[in-house]
Image (tube, helix red, strand yellow):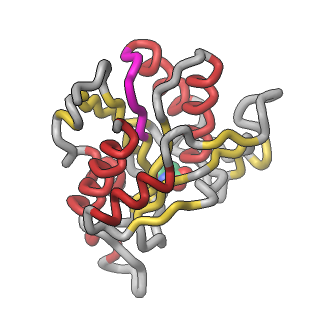
Amino acid sequence: MSAEGPSLVTGFEPFGGEAINASWEAVQLLPDSIEGSHVERRLLPVEFGRSGDVLCDELDRLSPTLVLAVGEAGGRAHVSVERVALNIMSARMPDNAGFAPQGEPVLAGAPDALLATLPVDACVDAARTAGVPTDASETAGLYVCNQLMYRLLYALRTAGKKAPAGFVHVPYVAEQVLERKETPFMPADYAARALVAIARAALC
Ligand code: PCA
């Protein structure tokens, strides 16, 4: 199958005192093309507002066939395909610009929740079939990743664009847990393999 437009895949810069972000480590390992769709990678700032603005500009510019936003969820053991984004921001720690919202909406007046438009269960099955521990997740948190997922789904919906879109959280990579006891990690090439399987399932 040859897809019409590119697949936009985003990862995040490091945050929370880390030197790397597992999401960008995985996104960098993706092939240049998946199912005939050119992979366009973008590195996003860990900032409420600006990450969503950059993503929305890219949606307008690229008109992607598929959008996979990827973030790091330290402490999770499996790749997780998020089902839902909530219209609320609540920060445990300030973002990389020093902003720490405490309960404000992502977009005032917009729906309380938006569901991923990629086929979550088929994506989870595909990643597992590819040999990578993967689950569906009922919460993307209330930090920058949830905000980005919400902005993504809202932008596509209001533009009437049908491209499947969603958010995937990946665990820490090994370097990040050297000093953390009992903390799960996953090599970036495993996470990348899951992302390829997820993208394929969403494109087919
Ligand atoms: N994870 C954070 C923000 C950036 C990232 O990679 C989150 O889950 O919100």
Q: Is residue 25 left or right of residue 148?
A: left
Going 37% across and 43% down the picture, which residue do you hit?
11
Question: Which segment is the magenta one?
Answer: 62-68
> Residue 82 location, x and y as percent?
54, 53
Residue 63 within the segment the image draws in magenta: yes
Going 63% across and 42% down the picture, which residue do you hit?
115
Q: Where is 30 relative to 67, above or below?
A: below
> Residue 12 location, x and y as percent?
40, 44
Q: Is residue 83 left or right of residue 113?
A: left
> Residue 38 location, x and y as percent?
22, 27
Residue 122 within the segment the image draws in magenta: no
Going 42% across and 47% down the picture, which residue do you hit?
70
Q: Quadrant of residue 32?
A: top left
> Residue 120 location, x and y as percent?
50, 51
Q: Is residue 2 left or right of residue 103?
A: left
Taking depth in this image into account, of 177 and 33 the one nearest to the observer is 33
Quadrant into which the N terminus falls: top left
- Asked if residue 203 can be seen in this view, the reply is yes
Q: Where is 17 relative to 41, above or below?
A: below
